[in-house]
Amino acid sequence: MRVAMIGTGYVGLVSGACFADFGHVVTCIDKDASKIERLEKGEIPIFEPGLDALVETNVRGGRLSVTRDGAEAIRTADAVFIGVGTPSRRGDGHADLSYVYAAAAEIADLIQGFTVVVTKSTVPVGTGDEIERIIRERRPDAEFAVVSNPEFLREGAAIEDFKRPDRVVIGVNDIDSPTGARARSVMAELYRPLNLNESPLLFTERRTSELIKYAANAFLAMKITFINEMADLCEKVGADVQQVARGIGLDKRIGNKFLHAGPGYGGSCFPKDTLALVRTATDAGSPVRLIETTVAVNDARKAALADRVRNTLGDDLNGRTVALLGLTFKPNTDDMRDAPSLDLAPALIAAGATVRAYDPEGMHEAAALMPDVVMTPGPYDAVEGADVVVIVTEWDQFRALDLDRIKLLMNRPVMVDLRNVYRPDDMRARGYVYSGIGRP
Ligand code: NAD
Protein backbone atom coordinates (compact mmCIF):
# COMPACT_ATOMS: atom_id res chain seq x y z
CA MET A 1 0.00 0.00 0.00
CA ARG A 2 1.08 3.57 -0.58
CA VAL A 3 0.84 5.85 2.45
CA ALA A 4 1.26 9.62 2.73
CA MET A 5 1.76 10.88 6.30
CA ILE A 6 1.10 14.58 6.77
CA GLY A 7 2.97 15.75 9.87
CA THR A 8 6.30 14.16 10.74
CA GLY A 9 6.41 14.68 14.50
CA TYR A 10 6.40 12.20 17.38
CA VAL A 11 3.37 10.40 15.96
CA GLY A 12 3.86 10.91 12.21
CA LEU A 13 7.49 9.83 12.07
CA VAL A 14 7.01 6.79 14.29
CA SER A 15 3.82 5.68 12.50
CA GLY A 16 5.37 6.31 9.09
CA ALA A 17 8.53 4.38 9.92
CA CYS A 18 6.52 1.48 11.39
CA PHE A 19 4.17 1.27 8.39
CA ALA A 20 7.26 1.25 6.14
CA ASP A 21 8.74 -1.49 8.29
CA PHE A 22 5.54 -3.50 7.67
CA GLY A 23 6.38 -3.26 3.96
CA HIS A 24 4.21 -0.35 2.86
CA VAL A 25 5.66 2.52 0.82
CA VAL A 26 5.49 5.61 3.00
CA THR A 27 6.18 9.29 2.41
CA CYS A 28 6.41 11.44 5.53
CA ILE A 29 5.55 15.05 4.80
CA ASP A 30 6.25 18.08 6.96
CA LYS A 31 6.13 21.78 6.29
CA ASP A 32 8.89 22.40 8.83
CA ALA A 33 11.91 22.79 6.53
CA SER A 34 14.50 22.30 9.28
CA LYS A 35 12.91 19.01 10.33
CA ILE A 36 12.97 17.67 6.78
CA GLU A 37 16.54 18.88 6.21
CA ARG A 38 17.72 17.06 9.33
CA LEU A 39 15.91 13.89 8.30
CA GLU A 40 17.40 14.09 4.83
CA LYS A 41 20.84 14.22 6.43
CA GLY A 42 20.00 11.08 8.38
CA GLU A 43 19.41 12.89 11.68
CA ILE A 44 16.33 12.18 13.77
CA PRO A 45 14.77 15.45 14.98
CA ILE A 46 13.32 13.92 18.16
CA PHE A 47 14.65 11.52 20.78
CA GLU A 48 12.76 8.23 20.67
CA PRO A 49 14.55 4.97 21.49
CA GLY A 50 15.14 2.81 18.40
CA LEU A 51 13.71 5.31 15.94
CA ASP A 52 17.04 6.18 14.30
CA ALA A 53 17.74 2.57 13.30
CA LEU A 54 14.15 2.00 12.13
CA VAL A 55 14.17 5.11 9.94
CA GLU A 56 17.58 4.31 8.50
CA THR A 57 16.68 0.72 7.61
CA ASN A 58 13.49 1.72 5.87
CA VAL A 59 14.97 4.69 4.03
CA ARG A 60 17.74 2.40 2.79
CA GLY A 61 15.15 -0.20 1.82
CA GLY A 62 13.38 2.38 -0.35
CA ARG A 63 10.13 2.14 1.62
CA LEU A 64 10.39 5.42 3.55
CA SER A 65 11.05 8.92 2.28
CA VAL A 66 10.60 12.41 3.69
CA THR A 67 9.66 15.60 1.89
CA ARG A 68 8.32 19.11 2.29
CA ASP A 69 6.37 18.80 -0.93
CA GLY A 70 3.93 15.96 -0.54
CA ALA A 71 1.89 16.59 -3.71
CA GLU A 72 3.02 13.51 -5.61
CA ALA A 73 2.78 11.23 -2.57
CA ILE A 74 -0.75 12.43 -1.78
CA ARG A 75 -1.86 12.01 -5.41
CA THR A 76 -0.73 8.40 -5.52
CA ALA A 77 -1.58 7.31 -1.97
CA ASP A 78 -4.09 4.64 -1.01
CA ALA A 79 -4.26 6.26 2.42
CA VAL A 80 -3.36 9.80 3.45
CA PHE A 81 -2.85 10.17 7.20
CA ILE A 82 -3.27 13.46 9.02
CA GLY A 83 -0.78 13.40 11.94
CA VAL A 84 -0.41 17.13 12.60
CA GLY A 85 -0.55 18.76 16.03
CA THR A 86 -3.82 19.60 17.79
CA PRO A 87 -2.63 21.81 20.66
CA SER A 88 -4.90 23.63 23.09
CA ARG A 89 -6.33 26.75 21.55
CA ARG A 90 -5.10 29.80 23.41
CA GLY A 91 -7.59 31.02 25.95
CA ASP A 92 -10.37 28.45 25.85
CA GLY A 93 -8.80 24.96 25.95
CA HIS A 94 -10.59 23.72 22.82
CA ALA A 95 -8.39 21.69 20.49
CA ASP A 96 -6.90 23.96 17.82
CA LEU A 97 -7.91 22.24 14.60
CA SER A 98 -6.43 24.75 12.19
CA TYR A 99 -3.54 22.43 11.20
CA VAL A 100 -5.94 19.54 10.66
CA TYR A 101 -8.28 21.55 8.46
CA ALA A 102 -5.37 23.05 6.50
CA ALA A 103 -4.15 19.52 5.81
CA ALA A 104 -7.66 18.50 4.73
CA ALA A 105 -7.75 21.35 2.20
CA GLU A 106 -4.32 20.35 0.84
CA ILE A 107 -5.49 16.75 0.50
CA ALA A 108 -8.68 17.83 -1.27
CA ASP A 109 -6.73 19.63 -3.96
CA LEU A 110 -4.52 16.64 -4.71
CA ILE A 111 -6.20 13.25 -4.29
CA GLN A 112 -6.78 11.10 -7.35
CA GLY A 113 -8.67 7.84 -7.45
CA PHE A 114 -10.20 6.33 -4.32
CA THR A 115 -8.30 7.58 -1.27
CA VAL A 116 -8.81 6.94 2.42
CA VAL A 117 -8.17 10.07 4.46
CA VAL A 118 -7.21 8.96 7.96
CA THR A 119 -7.17 11.20 11.02
CA LYS A 120 -4.38 10.01 13.32
CA SER A 121 -4.22 13.28 15.22
CA THR A 122 -6.31 13.41 18.38
CA VAL A 123 -9.41 15.35 17.34
CA PRO A 124 -12.75 16.15 19.02
CA VAL A 125 -15.92 14.34 18.08
CA GLY A 126 -17.27 15.58 14.78
CA THR A 127 -13.91 16.64 13.29
CA GLY A 128 -14.13 13.83 10.73
CA ASP A 129 -17.47 15.25 9.56
CA GLU A 130 -15.86 18.65 9.02
CA ILE A 131 -12.87 17.14 7.17
CA GLU A 132 -15.32 15.33 4.90
CA ARG A 133 -17.22 18.57 4.29
CA ILE A 134 -14.01 20.49 3.47
CA ILE A 135 -12.88 17.90 0.95
CA ARG A 136 -16.33 17.47 -0.61
CA GLU A 137 -16.76 21.23 -0.99
CA ARG A 138 -13.43 21.65 -2.78
CA ARG A 139 -13.66 18.47 -4.80
CA PRO A 140 -17.26 17.39 -5.44
CA ASP A 141 -15.89 14.77 -7.85
CA ALA A 142 -13.40 13.11 -5.47
CA GLU A 143 -13.73 9.48 -4.42
CA PHE A 144 -12.73 9.24 -0.76
CA ALA A 145 -13.64 8.15 2.73
CA VAL A 146 -12.67 9.90 5.96
CA VAL A 147 -11.64 7.47 8.68
CA SER A 148 -10.68 8.04 12.32
CA ASN A 149 -7.69 6.03 13.55
CA PRO A 150 -6.50 7.57 16.83
CA GLU A 151 -3.00 6.80 18.00
CA PHE A 152 -2.30 5.40 21.48
CA LEU A 153 1.50 5.14 21.40
CA ARG A 154 3.50 6.41 24.36
CA GLU A 155 6.61 8.48 23.81
CA GLY A 156 9.64 6.56 25.02
CA ALA A 157 8.09 3.22 24.00
CA ALA A 158 6.52 4.39 20.76
CA ILE A 159 7.79 1.76 18.34
CA GLU A 160 6.85 -1.16 20.57
CA ASP A 161 3.45 0.43 21.20
CA PHE A 162 2.83 0.96 17.49
CA LYS A 163 3.87 -2.56 16.55
CA ARG A 164 2.22 -4.35 19.47
CA PRO A 165 -0.73 -2.16 20.41
CA ASP A 166 -3.39 -3.34 22.87
CA ARG A 167 -5.88 -2.52 20.10
CA VAL A 168 -6.22 -0.50 16.92
CA VAL A 169 -9.36 1.63 16.82
CA ILE A 170 -10.73 2.45 13.37
CA GLY A 171 -13.79 4.63 12.89
CA VAL A 172 -15.53 4.16 9.54
CA ASN A 173 -19.02 5.44 8.83
CA ASP A 174 -21.53 3.28 6.93
CA ILE A 175 -19.14 0.38 6.90
CA ASP A 176 -21.54 -1.74 4.86
CA SER A 177 -21.84 0.81 2.06
CA PRO A 178 -19.51 0.34 -0.94
CA THR A 179 -17.35 3.29 0.18
CA GLY A 180 -17.30 2.15 3.81
CA ALA A 181 -16.35 -1.38 2.82
CA ARG A 182 -13.51 -0.10 0.62
CA ALA A 183 -12.21 2.07 3.43
CA ARG A 184 -12.41 -0.85 5.82
CA SER A 185 -10.41 -3.09 3.53
CA VAL A 186 -7.68 -0.47 3.01
CA MET A 187 -7.36 -0.04 6.80
CA ALA A 188 -7.36 -3.80 7.40
CA GLU A 189 -4.65 -4.25 4.77
CA LEU A 190 -2.51 -1.50 6.32
CA TYR A 191 -2.60 -3.16 9.72
CA ARG A 192 -2.56 -6.77 8.47
CA PRO A 193 1.09 -7.28 9.51
CA LEU A 194 0.10 -6.90 13.18
CA ASN A 195 -0.58 -10.07 15.09
CA LEU A 196 -4.32 -9.58 15.21
CA ASN A 197 -4.74 -12.05 18.06
CA GLU A 198 -2.68 -9.79 20.26
CA SER A 199 -3.79 -6.51 18.72
CA PRO A 200 -7.39 -6.65 17.58
CA LEU A 201 -8.77 -4.12 15.14
CA LEU A 202 -11.84 -2.49 16.62
CA PHE A 203 -14.10 -1.01 13.96
CA THR A 204 -16.61 1.59 15.15
CA GLU A 205 -18.50 4.55 13.76
CA ARG A 206 -16.25 7.55 13.27
CA ARG A 207 -17.61 9.68 16.12
CA THR A 208 -17.26 6.79 18.53
CA SER A 209 -13.66 6.27 17.51
CA GLU A 210 -12.90 9.96 18.00
CA LEU A 211 -14.37 9.84 21.49
CA ILE A 212 -12.55 6.62 22.45
CA LYS A 213 -9.23 8.46 22.26
CA TYR A 214 -10.35 11.25 24.62
CA ALA A 215 -12.10 8.83 26.96
CA ALA A 216 -8.92 6.73 27.19
CA ASN A 217 -6.66 9.68 27.94
CA ALA A 218 -9.11 11.23 30.39
CA PHE A 219 -9.44 7.94 32.24
CA LEU A 220 -5.66 7.55 32.53
CA ALA A 221 -5.23 11.16 33.67
CA MET A 222 -7.95 10.54 36.27
CA LYS A 223 -6.21 7.38 37.47
CA ILE A 224 -2.94 9.26 37.98
CA THR A 225 -4.74 12.06 39.75
CA PHE A 226 -6.54 9.57 41.97
CA ILE A 227 -3.32 8.02 43.21
CA ASN A 228 -1.77 11.46 43.65
CA GLU A 229 -4.61 12.43 45.98
CA MET A 230 -4.21 9.14 47.83
CA ALA A 231 -0.51 10.02 48.21
CA ASP A 232 -1.41 13.35 49.80
CA LEU A 233 -3.72 11.55 52.17
CA CYS A 234 -0.99 9.00 52.98
CA GLU A 235 1.31 11.84 53.97
CA LYS A 236 -1.27 13.16 56.41
CA VAL A 237 -2.24 9.84 58.00
CA GLY A 238 1.10 8.01 57.95
CA ALA A 239 0.40 5.43 55.24
CA ASP A 240 2.52 4.38 52.25
CA VAL A 241 1.09 5.13 48.80
CA GLN A 242 3.28 2.58 47.06
CA GLN A 243 1.76 -0.17 49.15
CA VAL A 244 -1.71 1.29 48.67
CA ALA A 245 -1.09 1.23 44.90
CA ARG A 246 0.10 -2.35 45.05
CA GLY A 247 -2.76 -3.35 47.28
CA ILE A 248 -5.39 -1.97 44.95
CA GLY A 249 -3.54 -2.72 41.71
CA LEU A 250 -3.55 -6.46 42.34
CA ASP A 251 -7.31 -6.29 41.94
CA LYS A 252 -7.74 -7.05 38.23
CA ARG A 253 -10.69 -4.68 38.01
CA ILE A 254 -8.31 -1.85 38.93
CA GLY A 255 -4.99 -3.01 37.43
CA ASN A 256 -1.51 -1.96 38.51
CA LYS A 257 -0.67 0.46 35.69
CA PHE A 258 -0.78 4.23 36.06
CA LEU A 259 -0.76 4.09 39.83
CA HIS A 260 2.55 5.85 40.41
CA ALA A 261 2.16 8.93 42.54
CA GLY A 262 4.25 11.87 41.41
CA PRO A 263 4.36 15.55 40.58
CA GLY A 264 1.20 15.52 38.44
CA TYR A 265 0.73 14.48 34.84
CA GLY A 266 2.21 16.50 32.00
CA GLY A 267 3.27 15.85 28.43
CA SER A 268 1.92 16.53 25.01
CA CYS A 269 -1.40 14.70 25.43
CA PHE A 270 -3.07 14.43 28.84
CA PRO A 271 -3.20 18.15 29.70
CA LYS A 272 -4.55 19.25 26.34
CA ASP A 273 -6.81 16.25 25.80
CA THR A 274 -8.49 16.46 29.22
CA LEU A 275 -9.14 20.16 28.64
CA ALA A 276 -10.50 19.56 25.15
CA LEU A 277 -12.83 16.83 26.43
CA VAL A 278 -14.12 19.18 29.13
CA ARG A 279 -14.88 21.78 26.44
CA THR A 280 -16.53 19.29 24.09
CA ALA A 281 -18.70 17.91 26.89
CA THR A 282 -19.68 21.36 28.16
CA ASP A 283 -20.64 22.44 24.64
CA ALA A 284 -22.71 19.27 24.26
CA GLY A 285 -24.58 20.07 27.48
CA SER A 286 -23.19 16.96 29.19
CA PRO A 287 -20.40 18.17 31.48
CA VAL A 288 -17.75 15.67 32.59
CA ARG A 289 -17.32 16.80 36.18
CA LEU A 290 -14.83 14.07 37.09
CA ILE A 291 -12.51 15.32 34.36
CA GLU A 292 -13.06 18.97 35.25
CA THR A 293 -11.93 18.09 38.77
CA THR A 294 -9.01 16.04 37.46
CA VAL A 295 -7.76 19.05 35.51
CA ALA A 296 -8.12 21.38 38.48
CA VAL A 297 -6.47 18.98 40.94
CA ASN A 298 -3.55 18.34 38.60
CA ASP A 299 -3.00 22.04 37.91
CA ALA A 300 -3.00 22.77 41.64
CA ARG A 301 -0.54 19.94 42.27
CA LYS A 302 1.96 21.27 39.75
CA ALA A 303 1.55 24.80 41.10
CA ALA A 304 2.37 23.56 44.63
CA LEU A 305 5.61 21.76 43.76
CA ALA A 306 7.82 24.64 44.89
CA ASP A 307 6.06 24.60 48.30
CA ARG A 308 6.98 20.93 48.62
CA VAL A 309 10.63 21.84 48.03
CA ARG A 310 10.43 24.68 50.54
CA ASN A 311 8.85 22.45 53.17
CA THR A 312 11.52 19.77 52.83
CA LEU A 313 14.28 22.35 52.98
CA GLY A 314 12.54 23.78 56.04
CA ASP A 315 13.75 27.18 55.01
CA ASP A 316 13.03 30.12 52.75
CA LEU A 317 14.01 29.50 49.12
CA ASN A 318 15.37 33.00 48.72
CA GLY A 319 19.10 32.85 48.02
CA ARG A 320 19.13 29.04 47.98
CA THR A 321 20.32 26.84 45.14
CA VAL A 322 18.05 24.08 43.87
CA ALA A 323 19.27 21.30 41.57
CA LEU A 324 16.72 19.64 39.30
CA LEU A 325 17.48 16.17 37.95
CA GLY A 326 15.27 15.56 34.92
CA LEU A 327 13.22 18.16 33.07
CA THR A 328 11.18 16.21 30.50
CA PHE A 329 7.67 15.10 31.45
CA LYS A 330 8.83 11.49 31.59
CA PRO A 331 12.00 9.51 30.85
CA ASN A 332 13.13 8.38 27.38
CA THR A 333 11.81 11.39 25.53
CA ASP A 334 13.05 14.90 24.83
CA ASP A 335 9.47 16.20 24.88
CA MET A 336 9.06 19.17 27.22
CA ARG A 337 5.41 19.96 26.45
CA ASP A 338 3.54 20.70 29.71
CA ALA A 339 6.30 19.06 31.77
CA PRO A 340 5.94 19.61 35.56
CA SER A 341 9.43 21.19 35.51
CA LEU A 342 7.91 24.09 33.58
CA ASP A 343 5.79 24.90 36.65
CA LEU A 344 8.44 24.09 39.22
CA ALA A 345 11.50 25.94 37.87
CA PRO A 346 9.83 29.36 37.39
CA ALA A 347 8.17 29.11 40.83
CA LEU A 348 11.54 28.40 42.47
CA ILE A 349 13.13 31.30 40.63
CA ALA A 350 10.25 33.60 41.56
CA ALA A 351 10.87 32.64 45.20
CA GLY A 352 14.46 33.83 44.86
CA ALA A 353 16.24 30.50 44.29
CA THR A 354 18.98 29.79 41.79
CA VAL A 355 18.06 26.73 39.73
CA ARG A 356 20.61 24.38 38.20
CA ALA A 357 19.42 21.45 36.10
CA TYR A 358 20.44 18.44 34.10
CA ASP A 359 18.38 16.24 31.78
CA PRO A 360 19.82 13.50 29.54
CA GLU A 361 17.82 14.44 26.42
CA GLY A 362 15.61 17.44 27.15
CA MET A 363 18.07 20.23 27.86
CA HIS A 364 18.20 21.70 24.39
CA GLU A 365 14.44 22.14 24.32
CA ALA A 366 14.30 23.13 27.99
CA ALA A 367 16.98 25.81 27.68
CA ALA A 368 14.76 27.73 25.29
CA LEU A 369 11.75 27.41 27.61
CA MET A 370 13.51 28.26 30.88
CA PRO A 371 16.33 30.67 30.05
CA ASP A 372 16.98 31.52 33.71
CA VAL A 373 17.86 27.95 34.64
CA VAL A 374 21.57 27.05 34.60
CA MET A 375 21.92 23.90 32.48
CA THR A 376 24.81 21.66 33.51
CA PRO A 377 26.66 18.87 31.67
CA GLY A 378 25.80 16.10 34.15
CA PRO A 379 23.93 15.30 37.35
CA TYR A 380 26.96 15.79 39.59
CA ASP A 381 27.57 19.25 38.11
CA ALA A 382 23.96 20.15 38.78
CA VAL A 383 24.11 19.34 42.50
CA GLU A 384 27.36 21.20 43.16
CA GLY A 385 26.72 23.75 45.92
CA ALA A 386 22.98 23.02 45.97
CA ASP A 387 20.88 23.29 49.11
CA VAL A 388 18.35 20.79 47.82
CA VAL A 389 18.20 18.35 44.91
CA VAL A 390 14.88 17.45 43.31
CA ILE A 391 14.38 14.30 41.24
CA VAL A 392 11.82 15.52 38.73
CA THR A 393 12.00 12.79 36.07
CA GLU A 394 12.88 9.15 36.76
CA TRP A 395 15.52 8.63 34.07
CA ASP A 396 17.32 5.32 34.66
CA GLN A 397 20.61 7.13 35.20
CA PHE A 398 19.13 8.82 38.30
CA ARG A 399 18.17 5.50 39.89
CA ALA A 400 21.64 4.57 41.08
CA LEU A 401 23.34 7.90 41.69
CA ASP A 402 26.47 8.00 43.83
CA LEU A 403 24.66 9.43 46.84
CA ASP A 404 27.78 9.80 48.97
CA ARG A 405 29.43 11.84 46.23
CA ILE A 406 26.32 13.98 45.90
CA LYS A 407 26.26 14.56 49.64
CA LEU A 408 29.83 15.85 49.51
CA LEU A 409 29.09 18.08 46.53
CA MET A 410 25.97 19.64 48.00
CA ASN A 411 25.82 22.50 50.39
CA ARG A 412 23.23 20.57 52.43
CA PRO A 413 22.14 16.96 51.87
CA VAL A 414 18.44 17.50 51.16
CA MET A 415 16.51 15.55 48.53
CA VAL A 416 12.95 15.90 47.24
CA ASP A 417 12.18 12.75 45.29
CA LEU A 418 9.08 13.46 43.18
CA ARG A 419 9.23 9.96 41.63
CA ASN A 420 9.90 7.81 44.70
CA VAL A 421 13.11 6.47 43.18
CA TYR A 422 14.87 6.12 46.56
CA ARG A 423 13.85 4.59 49.88
CA PRO A 424 13.20 6.93 52.79
CA ASP A 425 14.97 4.74 55.39
CA ASP A 426 18.09 4.32 53.19
CA MET A 427 18.27 8.01 52.54
CA ARG A 428 17.98 8.89 56.19
CA ALA A 429 20.63 6.31 57.05
CA ARG A 430 22.91 8.06 54.57
CA GLY A 431 22.34 11.32 56.36
CA TYR A 432 19.95 12.98 53.97
CA VAL A 433 16.91 15.04 54.77
CA TYR A 434 14.58 13.29 52.36
CA SER A 435 10.99 13.53 51.21
CA GLY A 436 9.24 11.40 48.63
CA ILE A 437 5.61 11.33 47.59
CA GLY A 438 3.03 9.73 49.85
CA ARG A 439 5.39 7.76 52.08
CA PRO A 440 5.91 8.09 55.80
P1 NAD B 1 4.27 17.19 16.71
O1 NAD B 1 4.11 18.62 17.03
O2 NAD B 1 5.46 16.45 17.18
O3 NAD B 1 4.20 16.99 15.12
C1 NAD B 1 3.27 17.61 14.28
C2 NAD B 1 3.98 17.95 12.99
O4 NAD B 1 3.01 18.34 12.01
C3 NAD B 1 4.95 19.10 13.08
O5 NAD B 1 6.23 18.67 12.68
C4 NAD B 1 4.38 20.16 12.12
O6 NAD B 1 5.40 20.89 11.46
C5 NAD B 1 3.61 19.29 11.16
N1 NAD B 1 2.56 19.95 10.38
C6 NAD B 1 1.56 20.76 10.81
N2 NAD B 1 0.78 21.13 9.79
C7 NAD B 1 1.27 20.53 8.66
C8 NAD B 1 0.89 20.52 7.30
N3 NAD B 1 -0.18 21.17 6.87
N4 NAD B 1 1.64 19.81 6.43
C9 NAD B 1 2.73 19.13 6.86
N5 NAD B 1 3.13 19.10 8.14
C10 NAD B 1 2.41 19.79 9.04
O7 NAD B 1 2.94 16.48 17.25
P2 NAD B 1 2.76 14.97 17.76
O8 NAD B 1 3.21 14.86 19.17
O9 NAD B 1 3.31 14.05 16.74
O10 NAD B 1 1.18 14.87 17.78
C11 NAD B 1 0.42 14.81 16.61
C12 NAD B 1 -1.00 14.40 16.96
O11 NAD B 1 -0.99 13.08 17.51
C13 NAD B 1 -1.66 15.28 18.01
O12 NAD B 1 -3.04 15.39 17.72
C14 NAD B 1 -1.48 14.49 19.28
O13 NAD B 1 -2.49 14.76 20.24
C15 NAD B 1 -1.60 13.08 18.79
N6 NAD B 1 -0.92 12.09 19.63
C16 NAD B 1 0.32 12.35 20.12
C17 NAD B 1 0.97 11.40 20.88
C18 NAD B 1 2.34 11.66 21.46
O14 NAD B 1 2.77 10.91 22.33
N7 NAD B 1 3.05 12.69 21.02
C19 NAD B 1 0.36 10.16 21.14
C20 NAD B 1 -0.90 9.92 20.60
C21 NAD B 1 -1.52 10.90 19.84
Image (tube, rainbow, N blue to C red):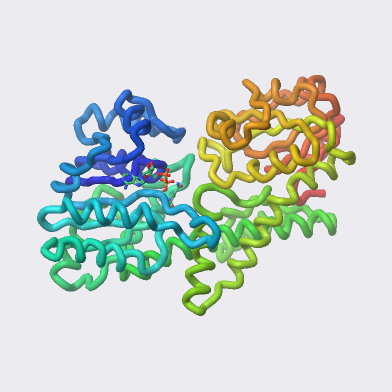
Residue at the extreme right? 315
Q: Is residue 189 something that shows in the picture?
A: yes
Q: Position of residue 330 (x, y in %)?
A: 57, 41
Of 11 and 353, which appears nearest the observer?
353
Q: Is residue 262 above or below residue 378?
A: below
Q: Is residue 399 left or right of residue 235?
A: left
Where residue 11 sits in the image (x, y, percent)? 39, 45
Q: Quadrant of residue 309?
A: top right
Outermost residue on the bottom side: it is: 285
Indicate the position of residue 178 as horizontal and vertical percent values. Answer: 13, 69
Q: In the image, what residue occupies the spot 85% across and 28% down?
A: 412
- Across and down, in percent, residue 236 comes to 84, 57
The quarter of the picture where residue 237 lies is bottom right
Front position in the image: 304 or 223: 304
Q: Residue at x 26, y 35 (%)?
A: 67
Left or right: residue 71 versus residue 399 is left
* Residue at point 29%, 52% (across, down): 103
Q: Is residue 197 visible?
A: no
Q: Is residue 36 left or right of residue 265?
A: left
**Could you tell me which residue is drawn at 52 percent across and 78 percent down?**
286
